[in-house]
Amino acid sequence: MSETDKKWLALAKRWGVLFGIPLLMLAIGIWQWSRADTPVTDVSAQIAEYQQVVRQLEAIEAEKPGRSATVRDSQGKEYPVWKVKNEYLMAIKDLQTQGLNVTTRNLQPVLAGCTIAFSVLALFWSALGVVYQRGMGAKAMQSREQLLATFQKGRKLLPTYMVVMVLLLFGAAIPLLVYEMMPILRHRNYSKGDMKLMFILGGLALFLLYSGCKVLIDVWKASRKPLENEPIEVMGQTVSRQQAPELWAFVDGVAAKTGAGMPDALVVGLNEGFFVTEHPVQLSNGALLPQGRVLYLPLPYMAFLNAGEVAAVIGHELGHFIGEDTLYSQRFSPIYSATIHHLVAISGGERHEESWMDILRRPATLFGEMFLDSFHEAVRYWSRKRELAADAVGAQVVSPQAVASSLLRISALAPHVDEALQANWDRGETVEGGVLGHVRQLVAAKGMTDPSEHLDKRQAHPTDTHPELAERLAALGVPVSPELLARAMDAQGSQLLQEFGLEQGAPAASSRTLAGAVAPAPVADLNAALQNELSSAAAANRSAKLVELREIAALATPETVIHERSAFMMGLFGFLALACFGGAVALFMAGLHMAVGAGVLAGGLVCLWVARLFWRDGQSPAMVLQPAGVRLFNAQELLPWSAIDDFEFNQANHMLTVIMALEPGVQPPAMGVGKRRAQFQKKKQRVVVMLKGVKKMKNQAFAELVVNQWRAYYARQELARMGEQA
């Protein structure tokens, strides 16, 4: 399926929810209207009509004294006259006192009309929302100013829109439920089933009423939350002009060429890529930087870029200040966070547990998601344009070739940086040379990765969306030449960190920065300080992670054999077989209905065969849970836990269905049973197992046992990867 087809399919599904649910409610309302009893408008005429029927029934009784007189209804079914007469007399009394009979009959068309009206309003509300959103998206593509103004307005209107949508659907559902109570209320003698149904319908209606009030309160609370930018957390340290004058001089030189102005703070660190921001920034040690422009410089990348390449990257980042990109990013963030708050409020709150009634909330929450998607698409559109504009600024500082070289070299180095960071994070202790030393070791051992294999990828950035690498190179007008690739894959590092005073060591004699200043004498090793900080955080993370993983791994059992609980079904069909045999014997002994007796006997034999089938199902294991995987029924091999992506357990009518979603391409072992008990659904890539319960175990306990065994497997794998024992 093409991307366009997928896009249209997703759109069709969304519209199916937005319009399908109100349409379904409307159809039910119309059906209820057609079923509604005729309202009693002229009580006197109705009483007179019933009295005439009573006189006719009394005349029939007079012809046949006693209780033997009967009448037939329109379908030919007979009823005792006395019983029908009593019902008409009670109806007359009800009309005279304006009781439940009249009230419920009069209410039915009103309730059905309410359902129809609210459903129609919900349909129009959905259509209005879709039209408004499309117009909003079109305006957002005209300029960033329009984008911000349009979505700021949309953010304010969104909670009202979602609340109205929920209330309209709740307003349609409540009378729909109450309508079904009306015929029951007209009964004179309520059965247990009637009482139970009324309790369910009334409870659901009251719950919807409560939920509607709760939505109003939750959205009101969400709207009162202050719109704040959450700080960006980075593993780094600030560098003052006194600590690294050469670095600041270098950035001064680049800023002068861009005309963008200087950042207020420089932060150097061991992770992330290069970026600038005006968001609040919090360092890993808990310090919150003063509000202003921040430029982040990652040491592992700077250790392999030359001065021209670093200048091109910094020029690109400072170029974002020219177009006020960082200010716009800072103003976009509250729109996201506010919309998320409102979505959570509409969906029932953070502690809400899903239920089938959430279907009435779904159109509202789906529209909120569509709002976010439309906003994200517009932000991404302008972000990509601004990234290309920032690349042009970097090209002005040095050259387009320098920008292209920096992009390719960063891409070639990124896998090694990620690997070194992951290894350091897992070890939780300082390794020789730290992250930077590890990156250097990986480059020396493996060489740089080929960046031409990553042209369709985007470089990491904490606040913006970069275009694909190929698109950025094309915009620069620089082809991926052999010379450019050779530079990108050159394993030789640079001396910039020593020149800038960020790492101890004597710089090369001829090395000069872009600013033209000679590097100062070696100073305090900032890289070592950063590594100590990262290792300290990693050690705490590793310790907590190991405790959690060992607790999960301890949930595993050596082997657990699972048998089906077939006694109930076996006993049921065994009893039916005995009943059939008894009935057949009685018929044969009486010499009556021999053919019927033979049929009953055949039915008993079938029930006996089914009972034996259930008995046989319970004799062999349905599952054998082992540390490495699960054996299903008569399979010769295990289905590895690594092949199972997720589980789902459903219980209904004494049956427990276990659904195992498999990883793509996995083919489970043949289970040696029919589709009645298990099957592999290839199209959905899942195994479905039908159990008649689990012997000596509750279904909930069985589900926890299976999932714990599965989680324990992955916990052991993660411990092994971290070099630890379970």
Image (cartoon, rainbow, N blue to C red):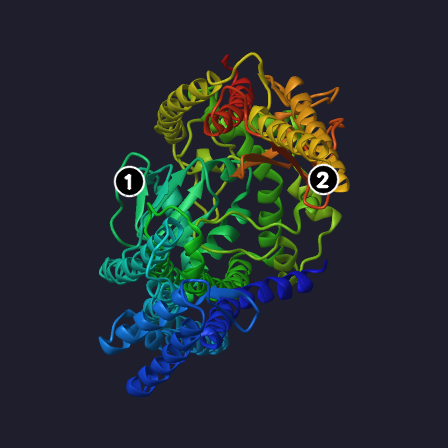
Q: Residue 48: horizontal and vertical position, in percent?
A: 33, 85
Residue for badge 1: 242
In the drawing, what numbered circle is on residue 72?
Answer: none
Residue for badge 2: 592
Q: Are marks 2 and 1 in contact (CB under 8 Å)?
A: no
Q: Residue 219: horizontal and vertical position, in percent?
A: 28, 61
Type of residue at label 1?
Gln
Marked residue nearer the N-terminal end (2 or 1)? 1
Which structural element holds mark 2?
loop
Q: Is residue 533 left or right of residue 15?
A: left
Which structural element holds mark 1?
loop
The CA span between labels 2 and 1 is: 113 Å
Q: Is residue 437 left or right of residue 536?
A: right
Q: Quadrant of the N terminus?
A: bottom right
Q: Nearer the viewer, mark 2 or mark 1?
A: 2
- Relative to 62, does residue 603 appear above or below in the rendering? above
Is disc 2 surrounded by few (<14), some (14 to 19) or many (20+) residues within 10 Å?
Answer: few
Q: Residue 557: horizontal and vertical position, in percent?
A: 52, 14
Is disc 1 surrounded by few (<14), some (14 to 19) or many (20+) residues within 10 Å?
Answer: few
Which of the 4 quarters of the picture holds residue 90? bottom left
Q: Is residue 598 at least partly visible in the picture?
A: yes
Which of the 4 quarters of the picture holds residue 338? bottom left
